[in-house]
Amino acid sequence: MTCPRCGKETWDNRTKKMDDPQWKNAADFTCKDKACGWKSGQPASPVGATTPIAVPAVSQAPQNGSRDAQLVALYWTCFDEVLQGLKTRSMASGFPGSEIAACVATMFIARSKIL
């Protein structure tokens, strides 16, 4: 297996975990590059490395009063609430962009069903 973060080889610790009780809490896979430090169960991107989310241009915004406009407004409300919740709990730096997007999408889908 190659490391999803740096692309180098990884250690397979599964046999050690079964044979040696001292290894029972170890990650199944760890990167051989100590500078990378990736372990299975961690996000592939380094903590704090997020992809910026592009705000739609004004020309992309739907007309006011339409269902599309309501959905766009709801999406950004959900986005702001998730970011504020993470910030309030000092957790924003521990979540990659994909995790934040998943939280926003889950909230948006649930709320859009009653809109």
Image (spheres, rainbow, N blue to C red):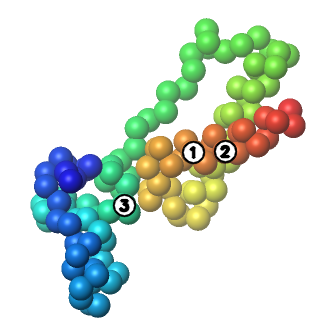
* 56 sits left or right of 27 in the view: right
Secondary structure beneath disc 1? Answer: helix
Callout 1 amino acid? Ala
**Residue 113 spot, x, y in % from top left:** 82, 36
Quarter of the image with the C terminus is: top right
**Residue 103 percent location from the top left of the image:** 61, 48
- Could you say which is closer to the camera, residue 46 or residue 10? 10
Q: Which mark is residue 42?
A: 3
Q: Please tell me which residue is depicted at 29% across the width and 90% down the height of the picture.
A: 21
Left or right relative to 19: residue 49: right
Give the distance between the C-alpha atoms of the residues marked 1 and 2, in whole angstroms: 6 Å
Q: Which mark is residue 102?
A: 1
Q: Residue at x 56, y 16 (%)?
A: 57
Disc 3 secondary structure class:
loop
Read off the residue under disc 2. Answer: 106
Task: Name which of mark 1 and mark 3 comes first in the sequence.
Answer: 3
